[in-house]
Image (cartoon, rainbow, N blue to C red):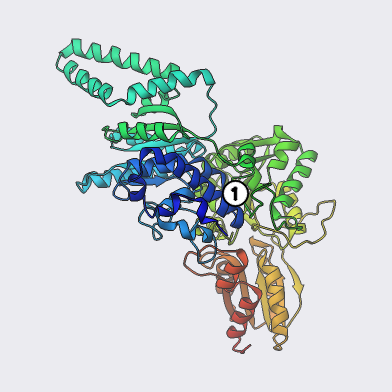
């Protein structure tokens, strides 16, 4: 339970309007209470943690200075949005964040008018904010538009495309670079802070504008003055600030600004909010600010399960190994034996398990930043020279690199291994992170092989198979969370390409299941057996190529075929089986079970499986209805 009595200001804040009505001297207290509240709540329920603690002052300053929701604030990704949600009417439901039927862990337009643009993936905020700013111009609306983007998201090329376009359009757009990673020497702080204070002062900007207008009337002589003045100012900025790049892209650069000094932040935003043209404010923050364990290990505390607030120790630890760690350890073992095997991640070493490889064999580890498109083509380049790149990217993030997979890898039949973590329904992160489409978007690509293991032992063997496959690209997809707990062998065995296996024998009904749906299908078969529905269960293993020989064999002895996958029904494994049935003119009854043509909300994986009828009981019910038997 939250002890409300210790919060003197926070529970009087119902909207940003209340923030704007506070005395300036009260802002620091509000920031302290806001940070403490986030720690109190998230320690009990878990969630994204460090980023939000680092943006408390920034959030308060933005809502203080800008007239939201009329003025628009576009947040990148959304990991840092918890303080924003608290200040925009969702304080009392923060304890439902990422829970089934609770509020989203990211920005969501349908949830609040203050959530201007939905987010969940990185590097989108500047593009979206630029569109909003231009729409305001087209609609003759006077408003301010602010994009907040982290230094991590600035490793994505889309951010620079947007910056470049903003400079060309000269839109009235403010970009806030939330930098919690760049190292700036202490002796630079005094100079850069003075320079920022000077250059953001309204009288200085008024003077700059007057000089610019005046010199514009002096023909050739005026142009020379302008040129000298611009070089002088740019030169000073290049020496004392990291802003030269942004100035070159057409932005007025201000910073670095200390991101935990609420007084300085509000002063800078007040001074620059009415400037014309694109402006970039460089704000230095600290991830996990105000909670020592998170300050000490920002990566570990990016997101957390419930934890003891006093000690930082996790609560309810699981004894089961995760698919991610099984993959990471298997790749480390393989790389130790094979000089040609390397690992690539797009800013997610811990999330993909490649942190194991990073620690054990750092010379074979590459982190390219939040740049999935680059990661894929980088892997393609490596593959042309005989290196076997294992490219580990979340299923939903690999969507960002479909063109590179098709054009740079598959077309050239390059041996790139794609390891797709978080395939299927991921749980609390919700629709922005569900890996619901990978079977569909990969299956359509020529030369691609796609496989999915039924358990962690098969995951190890499939990785070994993928590394040894030489004929082109090959993808391995597996779910988030704990594995089944099966015994792991010391050695690796090859899983024959395009061959499934029968794991349970029955009559009339045959279930072809993919990946973690094999276990759920076996449990569903046990339920159905009580109603005299005896099912054969097939571990498909391969989505592409299909094991057509096994399908031909099963079709002869079973009148009813059911395919089960944790992927969109459109274009996935079941679609492939259906296409083969059509090609062969098979008349067996076929039912495709998977995810319907809609986005799935957030909640625990078990809750979501139940919601979409992919849990054992839901599968049993669907199959029983298909064969017209009540259970």
Task: Identify the image quadrant of residue 159.
Answer: top left
Residue 82 seen from this side: yes
Residue at x 37% of width, y 53% of height? 15
Check the image and report above or below for 508 versus 72.
below
Q: 552 or 427: nearer the eye?
A: 427
Total residue callouts: 1
Q: Which residue is mark 1?
A: 303
Residue at x 27% of width, y 24% of height? 205
Q: 273 or 485: nearer the eye?
A: 273
Q: 605 or 559: nearer the eye?
A: 605
Q: Position of residue 174 (x, y in %)?
A: 34, 37
Name the quadrant of the C terminus.
bottom right
Q: Position of residue 296 (x, y in %)?
A: 64, 37
Residue 340 seen from this side: no
Residue at x 35% of width, y 50% of height? 18
- SS category of the residue bearing label 1: strand
Q: Position of residue 304 (x, y in %)?
A: 62, 51
Check the image and report above or below for 528 versus 157.
below
Q: Is residue 120 left or right of residue 460?
A: left
Name the quadrant of the N terminus.
bottom right
Q: Position of residue 435 (x, y in %)?
A: 56, 58
Residue at x 33% of width, y 26% of height? 200
């Amino acid at each position: 339970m939250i002890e409300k009595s210790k919060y003197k200001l926070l529970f009087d804040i119902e909207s940003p309007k209340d923030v704007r009505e506070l005395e300036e001297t009260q802002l620091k207290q509000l920031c302290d209470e806001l940070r403490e509240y986030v720690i109190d709540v998230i320690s009990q329920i878990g969630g994204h943690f460090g980023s939000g603690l680092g943006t408390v002052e920034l959030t308060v300053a933005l809502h203080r200075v800008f007239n939201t929701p009329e003025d628009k604030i576009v947040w990148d990704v959304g990991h840092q949005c918890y303080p924003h949600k608290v200040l925009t009417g969702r304080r009392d439901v923060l304890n439902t964040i990422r829970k089934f039927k609770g509020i989203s862990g990211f920005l969501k337009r349908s949830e609040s008018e203050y959530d201007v643009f939905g987010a969940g993936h990185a590097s989108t905020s500047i593009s979206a904010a630029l569109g909003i700013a231009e729409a305001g111009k087209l609609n003759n609306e006077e408003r301010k538009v602010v994009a907040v983007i982290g230094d991590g998201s600035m490793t994505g090329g889309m951010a620079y495309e947007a910056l470049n376009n903003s400079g060309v359009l000269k839109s009235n757009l403010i970009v806030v670079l939330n930098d919690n990673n760049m190292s700036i020497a202490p002796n630079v702080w005094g100079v850069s802070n003075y320079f920022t204070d000077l250059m953001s002062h309204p009288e200085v900007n008024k003077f700059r504008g007057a000089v610019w207008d005046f010199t514009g009337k002096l023909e050739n002589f005026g142009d020379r003055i302008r040129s000298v003045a611009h070089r002088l100012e740019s030169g000073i900025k290049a020496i004392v600030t990291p802003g030269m790049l942004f100035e070159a892209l057409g932005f007025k650069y201000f910073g670095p600004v200390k991101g935990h000094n609420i007084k300085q932040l509000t002063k800078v935003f007040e001074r620059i909010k009415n400037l014309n043209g694109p402006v970039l404010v460089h704000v230095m923050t600290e991830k996990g600010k105000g909670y020592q364990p998170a300050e000490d290990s920002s990566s570990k505390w990016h997101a957390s399960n419930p934890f003891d607030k006093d000690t930082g120790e996790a609560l309810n630890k699981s004894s089961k190994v995760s698919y991610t760690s099984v993959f990471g350890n298997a790749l480390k073992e393989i790389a130790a034996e094979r000089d040609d095997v390397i690992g690539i991640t797009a800013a997610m070493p811990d999330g993909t398990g490649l942190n194991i490889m990073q620690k054990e064999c750092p010379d074979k580890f590459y982190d390219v930043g939040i740049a999935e498109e680059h990661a894929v083509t980088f892997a393609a380049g490596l593959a042309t020279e005989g290196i076997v790149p294992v490219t580990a990217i979340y299923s939903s993030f690999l969507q960002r690199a479909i063109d590179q997979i098709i054009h740079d890898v598959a077309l050239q039949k390059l041996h790139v291994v794609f390891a797709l973590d978080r395939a299927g329904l991921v749980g609390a992160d919700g629709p922005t992170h569900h890996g619901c489409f990978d079977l569909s978007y990969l299956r359509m690509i020529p030369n691609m092989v796609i496989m999915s293991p039924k358990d962690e032992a098969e995951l190890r063997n499939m990785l070994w198979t993928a590394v040894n496959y030489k004929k082109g690209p090959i993808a391995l997809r597996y779910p988030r969370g704990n594995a089944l707990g099966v015994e792991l062998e010391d050695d690796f065995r090859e899983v024959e390409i395009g061959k499934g296996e029968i794991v349970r024998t029955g009559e009339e009904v045959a279930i072809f299941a993919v990946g973690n749906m094999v276990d759920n299908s076996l449990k569903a078969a046990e339920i159905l057996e009580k109603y005299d529905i005896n099912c054969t269960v097939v571990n498909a293993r391969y989505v592409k190529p299909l094991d057509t020989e096994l399908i031909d064999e099963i079709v002869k002895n079973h009148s009813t075929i059911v395919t089960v996958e944790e992927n969109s029904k459109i274009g996935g494994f079941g679609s492939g089986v259906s296409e083969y049935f059509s090609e062969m003119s098979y008349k067996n009854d076929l039912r495709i079970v998977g995810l319907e043509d809609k986005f799935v909300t957030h909640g625990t994986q078990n809750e979501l499986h139940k919601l979409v009828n992919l849990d054992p009981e839901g599968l049993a019910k669907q199959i029983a209805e298909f064969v017209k038997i009540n259970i």
